[in-house]
Image: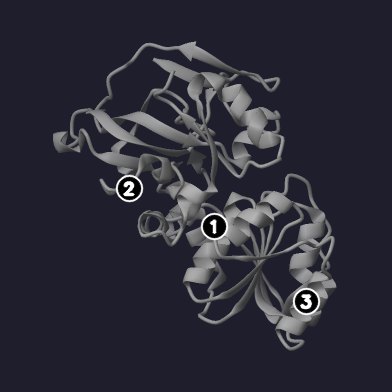
């Protein structure tokens, strides 16, 4: 069985591993496609070496077909198209006991803390498996996990129909947040400096502003009659993006922090005080978010296929990482784990 492993120093290599049958309560998946996400890029850069085991199989945005099941798992799951909700929580900490297991104080993420999907066969606990409809192409099924992130972010924002919303950053998650918010009847504007990402946004029915050519604050002022927007999602991970997200908010606006900010950045807390802003963190998702995401991808609310820039063989995993990291015309790059 082939697997792509991260071996530190930006190295990704293909290794052969023995195929071990699933144990009790486990499901073995023949992985079809795996998406590369920003967290995977952070890992490859060495930013998470103190957390990630080595060598590590990455990947948590996946789709595939159940190939085998262990004891205590229904045999009729074999052949089912599935994705995986890649979260393991303890069930005992204060967060778990209060009903927020997705932000467990001891949370482990499959594909980060535990072996992920960039392999031909992937064995996971059965409770993590989420069925996919048989009529959903597995390429699109690989985008359910990032869509679940967007569903959770919009739900966390408490978005109401008709609310003007700014999404700062039109990477995959920003684009998905914008489409999920749009589906909830929000009026949505994206802010994104990259011309290709703006083109993708416009292709899927979104309005995208170039901050180098448009005074975003003035645009929002005119758009909202001077009020500012009720919701801004910060998805860029950049100091300038955070500044924009705060600037466009109106009185009692909600700032939803989605991006990972590896280093502390300045935030104008005086504006938080003056406008009574609310700052919300939004991390991963719940099972409900995941199941809603399946339906949104299936019914086309999320145009998954339009976000896929490239599909590359497992053996070319290093090239695939380089392709995404180089920017250019890449939004979402998938790894085909059964090819080659």
Dot 1, crowdedness within 10 Å: few (<14), some or many (≥20)?
Answer: many
Residue 49 visible in rendering:
no
For disc 2, the marked residue is: 136
What is the quadrant of the N terminus in the image? Answer: top left
Query: Disc 2 and disc 1: Cα gap in Å?
Result: 18 Å
Query: Does 124 sit left or right of 226 as displayed?
Result: left
Secondary-structure class at tag 3: helix
User: x and y percent of residue 219 in the render?
Assistant: 78, 76
Residue at the spot 39% in from the left edge and 45% down from the top edge: 141
For disc 3, the marked residue is: 219
Residue at the spot 44% in from the left edge and 24% down from the top edge: 119
What is the quadrant of the C terminus in the image? Answer: top left
Q: Which mark is residue 176?
A: 1
Q: Which mark is residue 85?
A: none
Residue at the spot 42% in from the left edge and 45% down from the top edge: 140
Residue 291 visible in rendering:
yes
User: x and y percent of residue 193 in the render?
Assistant: 77, 55
User: x and y percent of residue 325 in the render?
Assistant: 69, 35
User: x and y percent of residue 168 in the render?
Assistant: 70, 61
Secondary-structure class at tag 2: loop
Specify the quadrant of the image occupied by residue 247: bottom right
Query: Does 105 sit left or right of 48 as displayed?
Result: left
Which tag, 3 or 1, sits closer to the chain's start?
A: 1
Asked if residue 273 is positioned above or below residue 167 in the image, the reply reads: below
Residue at the spot 36% in from the left edge and 60% down from the top edge: 299
Which tag, 3 or 2, sits closer to the chain's start?
A: 2
């Amino acid at each position: 069985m082939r697997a792509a492993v991260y071996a530190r120093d930006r190295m990704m290599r293909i290794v052969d591993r023995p195929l071990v049958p699933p144990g009790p309560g486990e499901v073995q998946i023949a992985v079809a496609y795996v998406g590369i996400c920003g967290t995977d890029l952070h890992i490859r850069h060495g930013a998470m070496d103190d957390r990630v085991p080595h060598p590590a199989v990455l990947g948590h945005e996946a789709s595939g077909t159940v190939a085998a099941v262990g004891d205590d798992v229904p045999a009729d799951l074999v052949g089912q198209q599935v994705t995986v909700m890649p979260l393991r929580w303890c069930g005992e900490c204060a967060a778990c006991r209060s009903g927020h297991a997705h932000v467990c104080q001891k949370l482990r993420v499959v594909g980060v803390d535990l072996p992920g999907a960039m392999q031909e066969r992937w064995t996971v606990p059965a409770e993590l498996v989420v069925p996919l409809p048989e009529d959903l192409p597995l390429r699109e099924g690989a985008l359910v996990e990032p869509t679940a992130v967007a569903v959770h972010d919009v739900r966390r924002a408490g978005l109401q129909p008709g609310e003007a919303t700014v999404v700062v950053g039109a990477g995959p998650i920003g684009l998905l947040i914008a489409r999920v918010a749009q589906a909830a009847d929000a009026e949505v504007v994206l802010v994104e400096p990259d011309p290709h990402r703006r083109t993708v946004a416009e292709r899927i029915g979104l309005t995208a502003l170039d901050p180098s050519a448009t005074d975003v604050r003035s645009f929002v002022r005119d758009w909202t009659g001077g009020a500012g927007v009720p919701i801004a999602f910060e998805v860029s991970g950049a100091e300038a993006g955070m500044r924009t997200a705060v600037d466009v908010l109106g009185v009692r606006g909600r700032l939803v922090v989605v991006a990972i900010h590896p280093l502390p950045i300045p935030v104008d807390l005086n504006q938080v005080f003056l406008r009574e802003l609310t700052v919300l963190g939004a991390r991963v998702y719940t099972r409900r978010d995941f199941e809603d995401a399946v339906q949104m991808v299936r019914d086309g609310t999320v145009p998954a296929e339009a976000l896929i820039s490239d599909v590359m063989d497992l053996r070319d995993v290093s090239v695939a990482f380089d392709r995404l990291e180089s920017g250019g015309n890449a939004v979402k790059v998938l790894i085909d784990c059964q090819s080659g």
